[in-house]
Image (cartoon, rainbow, N blue to C red):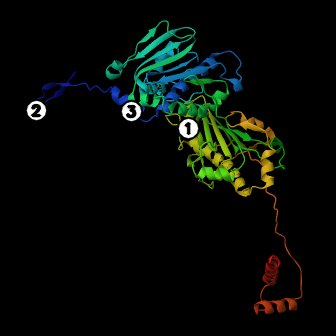
């Protein structure tokens, strides 16, 4: 309570009145429910997996060893286990330091200062771990072990229900971890979470598929993920590349379109092309009846090694706008990737759930111009080669070299002298392939001869009763008449 004085306007005397203090801190119930309402259970678990990867990145950046990008995450793993009784995720990614824990790892949102580690993550707001834990249950423990220290933090149901207590105890001492890393244990699962975790539901397989798609690049670089003791394998898509066509401007071959550029501290790479032959008639029928769901066509978007959009075929990635046709099964062989990399996560065009792209961000809108440019090259090519000719079959079967779509160095296959400078939008460099052109099996030929004017007028009068008909029209009529007779 605060006392203040005001003057009496009539006699000048001062009257003392008391102000009340309003408690403006948030209610935890509101805070927790709002945080968890807009995120799916699967995405919440992927948030925890993102934290494991951030730990691996911190370990890598603090190491003095030379980094092999192709095998960058070798030796790191995350083990996810769940059933109706509880959930755990455990990694060997170096652990959380005490200073990191006390400064913001457990705060409800990241403070103003930047992450001192300066690692290429995708976390911006500092709510991922807490939101995931709240989504799963009401009782949890976070155990951490680094090379120098160990601690445990407990989030109890009592703490969650106490609006006035926003502090957590960091208990230093030995924890039950065999290696440096983090283990999160969640008990008292929420009812809807228990239902998802039942063994007779397909949540486990859906989670495996999601990790396989969204972490394909990281898994391919050596990181291991186990879900209920099942190792997840990366779902890789590879683009077809005719290496001879890369170095020869005259030879047409199945080769992707590439773009690379950098703006405002964000590196951008794009590749789009064919990962397989055109759709067959049998496949077309299966798509129409909804029997085939394994296609990999469309755009994949990667931010700092994490796939945030997988195999998208909508206007979000340029289909059906600015001259690009809407996706159709005839384009089943076309796949593309857009890779964004930055040490400043807030500059990446991602949503707060980290499983979507911000379609209105300036950097993404500029990038989409190049995505559409490349995409249109291959949709036009597909339309020109609709006929399933032996030439088309040979064109794909003779090209055996491929490169993984989720390879962040896929642009290095293009010789430096084959790149063209881009002067529009955000600039950069592009490589536009010279694709094969169908041979005309029945080409048009011109028939040309000369006759005397009197003879032309005689024929025109005989056919049309009009000697002023143009000679080309007379010649065309005569040819069409004899063509019909010849066909009979």
Q: CA distance from mark 2 to mark 3?
A: 52 Å
Q: Who is closer to the viewer here, 281 or 236?
A: 281
- In the displayed structure, 230 sits above or below 206; it is above
- Picture quadrant of residue 66: top right
Q: CA distance from mark 1 to mark 2?
A: 63 Å
- Residue bearing the label numbered 2: 10
Q: Are marks 1 and 3 in contact (CB under 8 Å)?
A: no
Q: Is residue 451 left or right of residue 320?
A: right
- Residue bearing the label numbered 3: 34
SS of the residue under disc 1: loop
Task: Check disc 3: other Cα within 10 Å, few if <14, some if 14-19, many if 20+.
Answer: few
Q: Is residue 303 visible?
A: no
Q: Which mark is residue 349?
A: 1
Query: What is the x, y in percent for residue 181?
Result: 55, 15
Q: Is residue 174 visible?
A: yes
Query: What is the x, y in percent for residue 463?
Result: 78, 90
Q: Is residue 9 left or right of residue 98?
A: left
- Picture quadrant of residue 444: bottom right
Classify the position of the C terminus by image quarter: bottom right
Q: CA distance from mark 1 to mark 3?
A: 23 Å
Pick whichever of labels 1 and 3 is earlier in the sequence. 3
Query: What is the x, y in percent for residue 65?
Result: 70, 16
Query: What is the x, y in percent for residue 10?
Result: 10, 32
In the displayed orientation, state which residue is furthest to the left: 11
SS of the residue under disc 2: loop
Q: Who is closer to the viewer here, 479 or 121?
A: 479
- Picture quadrant of residue 235: top right
* Residue occupying image coordinates x 54% and y 36%: 350
Pick whichever of labels 1 and 2 is earlier in the sequence. 2
């Amino acid at each position: 309570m605060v006392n203040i004085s005001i003057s009496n306007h009539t006699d000048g005397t001062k009257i003392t009145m008391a102000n009340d203090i309003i408690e403006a801190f948030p209610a935890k119930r509101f805070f927790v429910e709002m945080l968890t309402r807009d995120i799916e259970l699967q995405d919440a678990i992927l948030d925890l997996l993102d934290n494991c990867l951030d730990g691996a990145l911190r370990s890598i950046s603090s190491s003095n060893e030379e980094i092999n990008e192709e095998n960058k995450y070798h030796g790191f793993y995350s083990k996810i286990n769940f059933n109706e009784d509880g959930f755990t995720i455990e990694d060997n990614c170096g652990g959380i330091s005490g200073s990191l824990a006390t400064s913001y790892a457990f705060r409800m949102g990241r403070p103003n200062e930047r992450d001192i580690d300066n690692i290429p993550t995708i976390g911006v707001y500092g709510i991922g771990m807490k939101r995931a834990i709240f989504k799963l249950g009401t009782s949890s423990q976070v155990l951490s072990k680094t090379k120098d220290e160990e601690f445990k933090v407990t989030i109890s149901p009592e703490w969650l229900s106490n609006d006035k207590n926003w502090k957590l105890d960091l208990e230093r001492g030995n924890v039950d971890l065999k290696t440096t890393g983090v283990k999160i244990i969640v008990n008292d699962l929420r009812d809807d979470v228990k239902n998802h975790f039942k063994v007779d539901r397909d949540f486990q397989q859906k989670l495996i598929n999601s990790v396989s798609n969204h972490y394909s690049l990281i898994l391919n670089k050596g990181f291991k993920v186990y879900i209920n003791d099942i190792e997840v394998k990366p779902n890789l898509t590879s683009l077809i590349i005719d290496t001879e066509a890369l170095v020869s401007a005259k030879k047409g071959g199945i080769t992707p379109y590439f773009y690379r550029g950098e703006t405002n501290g964000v590196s951008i790479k794009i590749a789009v092309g064919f990962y397989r032959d055109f759709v067959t008639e049998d496949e077309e029928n299966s798509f129409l009846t909804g029997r085939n769901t394994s296609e990999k066509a469309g755009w994949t978007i990667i931010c700092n090694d994490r796939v945030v959009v997988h195999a998208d075929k909508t206007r979000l990635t340029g289909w059906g706008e600015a001259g690009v046709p809407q996706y159709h099964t005839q384009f089943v062989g076309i796949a593309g990737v857009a890779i964004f990399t930055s040490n400043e996560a807030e500059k990446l065009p991602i949503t707060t759930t980290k499983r979507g792209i911000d379609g209105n961000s300036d950097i993404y809108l500029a990038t989409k111009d190049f995505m559409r440019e490349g995409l249109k090259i291959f949709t036009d090519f597909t339309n020109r080669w609709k006929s399933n000719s032996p030439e088309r079959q040979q064109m794909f079967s003779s090209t055996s070299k491929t490169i993984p779509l989720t390879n962040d160095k896929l642009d290095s296959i293009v010789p430096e002298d084959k790149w063209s400078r881009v002067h529009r939008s955000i600039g950069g460099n592009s490589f536009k392939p010279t694709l094969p052109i169908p041979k005309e099996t029945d080409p048009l030929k011109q028939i040309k001869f000369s006759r005397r004017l009197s003879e032309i007028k005689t024929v025109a009068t005989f056919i049309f009763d009009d000697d002023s008909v143009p000679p080309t029209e007379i010649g065309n009529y005569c040819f069409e008449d004899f063509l019909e007779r010849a066909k009979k």
